[in-house]
């Protein structure tokens, strides 16, 4: 195989793995912002919480990495319901600005809490042996963990797509994103729907946080460090759109990876350049409503 | 709180000490990063400060010290400058110690010149910091200590004929790779590629960068990253990509394998060769006592690292100088003068302060990561270069010359 | 006046009421513009701080710089309803104008430096505003944020010029007005920052109470109606964005001058977000919200970080959450409520 093709394949592979992380962590944010217009800047804090639960379960209780991911997702999903019912609910009718203030405040508190319990030193997780090493395809070896990440991502996408497009609840969510008043007037309980999607979105964020430990390490400031990245994926994809979030994650993941590989000197320029170009042409993102 | 206890003890000492006229309570302003993405760096130094003060407070009797701690904040310089100025104007400290980030030290330099307060740097590694004020002395290192020494060692002893550079895109990163390049090319090596790894704020996904290096097949890859959250990411990506199998050795300054993160890095780290001034596994009597005291105070899972060692030596140099001037710290210039030429047997090896530059002179150890007999990761010293000075200032390169 | 004139066919009786209404409205506007005594309070407080805390004026001048920065954001966020996460771009442009001006061009005169910073930053505001202000909501947020970060990246790419994240060190500015040296205690800096803040503040105050300011409020409240009555909405927004950018530039310039140092972190997302949080905390669209917000936030941050250098963020976070739950219109809103309460009490008595 010619050299440029090999490079192309590995950029696609790495980009895809990165895109899966972006998708899993951002999709919940997109749906909550699309459905309720709620600006949740504490989304990264849920991802961080998921990461630390995985660390605690694997390190202190000796539970396997994969089961820990599940437990973390479920736990964070449940915890998020408490926050949604107790705090977020009060602010649905408020301005964006108040929502920003509340959720940034929560993110700060989450950082301090994580520092208190886990200390500021970055944590890592012990991976099972079958996730270590690489898979050699002859012309190129691919890290096993990244292949795992891609598979997890693909499975999730299929499940979410099925749930969104083929089930009753999915149809209700789409209806509510499109026109909330109309959905309410035909008897859809948008409040309950929102609690459900919020919990699901937070659970996915937690899963993303757990998966990200191997990529970035985990420290308390994870709660805000990658927030801008998630917001970019949401904005570029279009609010409340599953398809859009996926496409945005793919575009950003692959182009960022290619930029790092081919032209590292320009640093983080690429992500922002794509964001600006896409938004100037399509202000509502790929699949957002104009 | 520990701090209050010391303050209390100090006050008590002042009251009962009959010779109160001579017993000075010396206030040391401690400026360290306690919050934000690099909070663990501040903590490593802070623990060393506290430990030294706890064990050696009696050494400077009848004088006492009080530590006044402030958060250095993000590496913007502005916050460090504000808190430092207030330590001087409001808390009336006699000495300053700490400073994790170079921008903080750079921003503070004019303040200490104006206030004539000695400032003892325990980390910030940009080479020309000591040139900025005659009141600055540094106990940690300059980026050139590790980088420049690694150059010839990599070429002669590790067998790197070609090397690719990768660095976090901020000044210490450029400094460190420049230093390595200068030493490496002088020895006869060839640099094949030089890749910035994105900003210091976020830990990036290292894989695409390293994949590019893997494809260009150099003998070695010299990596500089800040020793916080980035370090684990580097060894992970290096291991995942199977680069060692592909015959590319990972080398760098010791920021690559901070002692407190080494155990987390796993097999991927084994075989990495770093140049640096400290490791918990260095074999000397001082280090043994230091690590033992550390474990006793902070538990067996807590490890000191090179920052802690620098913090330890910072306090030691301050204490030794306090003894030398007999507690008379009101004249900052005199204090710094007294510190010039200070030398000691440290956990890091032999260290001293160069009277000309007020920068540290120290032993540089080339260290390889190994799996020790007890199953833990550790290091093996491959060779030691004695009494290394900051080459940037010796050769007067760029800003180091002014 | 109208009351004395007998009603004629040309002026139907309805007009009397209309004219009276218009007069009342005009009187209301004039009254709004007039100074009320509580407005003197923050200024008295600023001057009192100078005498009460002479050792803490370095911190004090940093607070004043942030008040100025928050004030510039209030002009666009509070009055025109433009939500942006890239305001640090203009702060940074101003900061680097005086920084590089002093380091590379030898332009070390501080006051003229402020004008230069205003000019450069407002130019940046005009160019980006002209293109970006067609968008709203999340799109505008991300576009402004990306602009600021791209400026930062560009600065890092040319770190030979900007000094990158190690910044432009050792800046030396001429004594203020050729006479006042910068002392260690920050006395000169504090007075300098306070005077600049006062001048800019009354300029901004004039703007928001002018017809132009009223038009901005109209755009914030109902942009469609403003379009319908033929108001040049886009140009009004670009104009105010340009002015606000220039003021943020002055704040940035003051930041560089009082610190004698600047690094690329001034462009950071954190800087944009923080000033927005301060403003919302204080209360938007009321000028003095910027004062209260920046001061409360920074004093609490300072207090908590002394209390616990490691966990202070918890306290700040809690402060923000409580503010949202119990002080809906910002800290200033609480004061207003208390004021209203007493006013009502007085009303019922008389």
Image: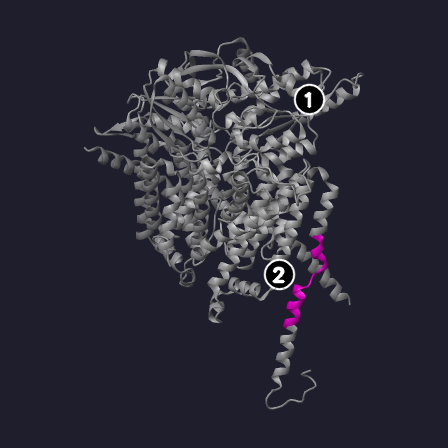
Residue B15: percent from the left, percent from the top?
79, 21
The residue that mark 2 highlights is C206
Judged from this view, the residue extending furthest toward the bottom is C9
Identify the image quadrant of the N terminus of chain C: bottom right
Judged from this view, the residue extending furthest toward the top is B285
The chain that hosts pointer 1 is B
Residue C37 part of the magenta segment: yes
Q: Foreground: B15 or C191? A: C191
Q: Foreground: A24 or B400? A: B400
Residue C291: percent from the left, percent from the top?
63, 50
Residue B383 part of the magenta segment: no
Residue at 36% across / 13% down in the picture? B157
On the rendered structure, is C326 left or right of B177? Answer: right
Mark 2, secondary structure of its residue? helix
Q: Foreground: A186 or B396? A: B396
* Marks 2 and 1, how far apart at CA: 55 Å
Residue B238: percent from the left, percent from the top?
35, 26
Label 2 in the same subunit as label 1: no
> What segment carries the magenta color?
C25-41
The residue that mark 1 highlights is B65
Identify the image quadrant of the C terminus of chain C: bottom right
């Amino acid at each position: 195989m010619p050299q440029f093709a090999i490079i192309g394949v590995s950029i696609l592979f790495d980009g895809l793995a990165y895109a899966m992380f972006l998708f899993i962590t951002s999709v919940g944010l997109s749906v909550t912002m699309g459905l309720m217009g709620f600006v949740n800047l504490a989304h990264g804090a849920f991802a961080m919480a998921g990461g630390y639960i995985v660390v605690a379960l694997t390190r202190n209780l000796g539970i396997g990495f994969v089961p820990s991911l599940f437990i973390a997702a479920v736990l964070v999903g449940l915890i998020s319901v408490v926050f949604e019912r107790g705090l977020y609910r009060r602010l649905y009718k408020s301005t964006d600005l108040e929502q920003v203030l509340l959720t940034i405040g929560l993110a700060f508190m989450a950082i301090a809490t994580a520092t208190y319990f886990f200390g500021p030193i970055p944590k890592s997780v012990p991976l099972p042996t079958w996730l270590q090493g690489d898979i050699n395809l002859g012309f190129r070896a691919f890290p096993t963990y990244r292949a795992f990440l891609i598979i997890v991502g693909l499975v999730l996408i299929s499940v979410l797509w099925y749930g969104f497009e083929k089930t009753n609840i999915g149809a209700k969510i789409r209806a509510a994103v499109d026109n909330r008043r109309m959905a309410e007037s035909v008897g859809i309980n948008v409040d309950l729907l929102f609690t459900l999607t919020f919990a699901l979105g937070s659970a996915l964020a937690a899963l993303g946080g757990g998966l990200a430990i191997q990529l970035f390490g985990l420290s308390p400031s994870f709660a805000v460090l990658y927030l801008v990245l998630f917001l970019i994926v949401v904005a570029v994809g279009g609010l409340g759109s599953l398809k859009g979030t996926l496409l945005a994650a793919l575009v950003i993941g692959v182009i960022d990876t290619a930029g790092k590989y081919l032209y590292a000197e320009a640093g983080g320029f690429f992500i922002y350049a794509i964001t600006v170009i896409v938004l100037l042409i399509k202000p509502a993102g790929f699949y957002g409503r104009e | 709180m520990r701090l209050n206890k010391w303050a209390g003890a100090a006050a008590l000492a002042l009251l009962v000490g009959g010779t109160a006229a001579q017993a000075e309570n010396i206030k040391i302003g401690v400026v360290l990063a306690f919050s934000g993405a690099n909070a663990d760096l501040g903590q490593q130094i802070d623990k060393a400060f506290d430990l030294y003060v706890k064990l050696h407070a009696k050494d400077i009797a009848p004088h006492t010290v009080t530590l006044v701690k402030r958060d250095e904040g993000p590496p913007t310089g502005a916050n460090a400058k504000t808190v430092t100025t207030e330590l001087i104007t409001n808390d009336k400290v006699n000495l300053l110690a700490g400073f994790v980030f170079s921008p903080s030290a750079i921003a503070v330099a004019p303040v200490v010149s104006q206030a004539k307060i000695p400032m003892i740097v325990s980390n910030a590694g940009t080479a020309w910091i000591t040139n900025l004020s005659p009141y600055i002395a540094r106990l940690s290192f300059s980026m050139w200590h590790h980088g420049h020494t690694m150059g010839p060692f990599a070429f002669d002893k590790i067998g790197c004929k070609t090397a690719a550079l990768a660095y976090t895109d901020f000044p210490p990163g450029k400094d460190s790779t420049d230093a390595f390049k200068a030493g490496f090319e002088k020895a006869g090596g060839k640099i094949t590629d030089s890749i910035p790894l994105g900003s210091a704020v976020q830990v990036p996904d290292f894989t695409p960068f390293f994949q590019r290096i893997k494809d260009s097949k150099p003998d070695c890859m010299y990596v500089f990253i800040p020793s916080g959250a980035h370090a684990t990411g580097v060894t992970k990506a290096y291991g995942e990509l199977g680069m060692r199998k592909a015959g590319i050795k990972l080398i760098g300054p010791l920021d690559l394998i901070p002692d407190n993160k080494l155990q987390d890095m796993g097999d991927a780290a084994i075989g990495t060769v770093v140049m640096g001034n400290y490791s918990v596994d260095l074999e000397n009597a001082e280090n043994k006592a230091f690590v033992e005291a550390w474990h006793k105070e902070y538990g067996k899972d807590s490890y000191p690292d090179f920052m802690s060692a620098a913090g330890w030596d910072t306090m030691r140099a301050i204490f030794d100088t306090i003894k030398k001037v007999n507690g008379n710290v009101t004249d900052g210039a005199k204090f710094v003068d007294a510190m010039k030429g200070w030398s000691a047997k440290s956990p890091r090896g032999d260290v001293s302060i160069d009277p000309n530059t007020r920068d540290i002179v120290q032993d540089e150890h080339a260290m390889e990561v190994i799996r020790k007999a007890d199953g833990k990761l550790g290091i093996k010293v491959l060779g030691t270069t004695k009494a290394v000075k900051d080459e940037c200032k010796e050769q007067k390169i760029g800003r180091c010359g002014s | 006046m109208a009351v004395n004139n007998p009603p004629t066919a040309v002026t139907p009786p309805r007009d009397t009421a209309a004219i009276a209404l218009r007069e009342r409205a005009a009187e209301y506007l004039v009254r709004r513009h007039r100074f009320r005594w509580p407005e003197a309070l923050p200024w008295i407080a600023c001057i009192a701080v100078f005498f009460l805390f002479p050792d803490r004026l370095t911190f004090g001048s940093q607070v004043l710089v942030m008040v100025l920065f928050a004030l510039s954001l209030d002009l666009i966020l509070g009055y025109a309803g433009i939500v942006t996460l890239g305001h640090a771009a203009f702060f940074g442009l101003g900061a680097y104008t005086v920084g590089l001006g002093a380091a590379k061009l030898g332009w070390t005169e501080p006051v003229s430096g402020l004008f230069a910073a205003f000019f450069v930053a407002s130019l940046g505001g005009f160019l980006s505003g002209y293109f970006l202000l067609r968008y709203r909501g999340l799109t505008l947020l991300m576009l402004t944020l990306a602009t600021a970060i791209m400026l930062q990246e560009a600065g890092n790419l040319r770190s030979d010029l900007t000094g990158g994240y190690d910044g432009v060190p050792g800046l030396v500015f001429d004594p203020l007005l050729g006479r006042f040296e910068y002392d260690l205690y920050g006395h000169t800096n504090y007075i300098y920052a306070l005077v600049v803040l006062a001048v800019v503040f009354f300029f901004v105050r004039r703007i928001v109470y002018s017809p132009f300011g009223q038009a901005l409020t109209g755009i914030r409240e109902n942009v469609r109606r403003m379009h319908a009555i033929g108001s040049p909405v886009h140009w009004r927004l670009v104009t105010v964005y340009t002015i606000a950018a220039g003021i943020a530039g002055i704040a940035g310039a003051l930041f560089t001058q009082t610190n004698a140092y600047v690094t690329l972190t001034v462009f950071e997302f954190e800087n944009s977000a923080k000033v927005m949080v301060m403003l919302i905390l204080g209360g938007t669209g009321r000028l003095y919200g910027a004062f209260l917000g920046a001061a409360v936030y920074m004093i609490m941050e300072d207090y908590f970080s002394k209390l616990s250098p490691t966990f202070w963020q918890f306290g700040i976070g809690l402060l923000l959450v409580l503010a949202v739950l119990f002080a809906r219109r910002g800290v200033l809103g609480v004061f207003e409520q208390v004021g209203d309460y007493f006013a009502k009490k007085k009303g019922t008595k008389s």
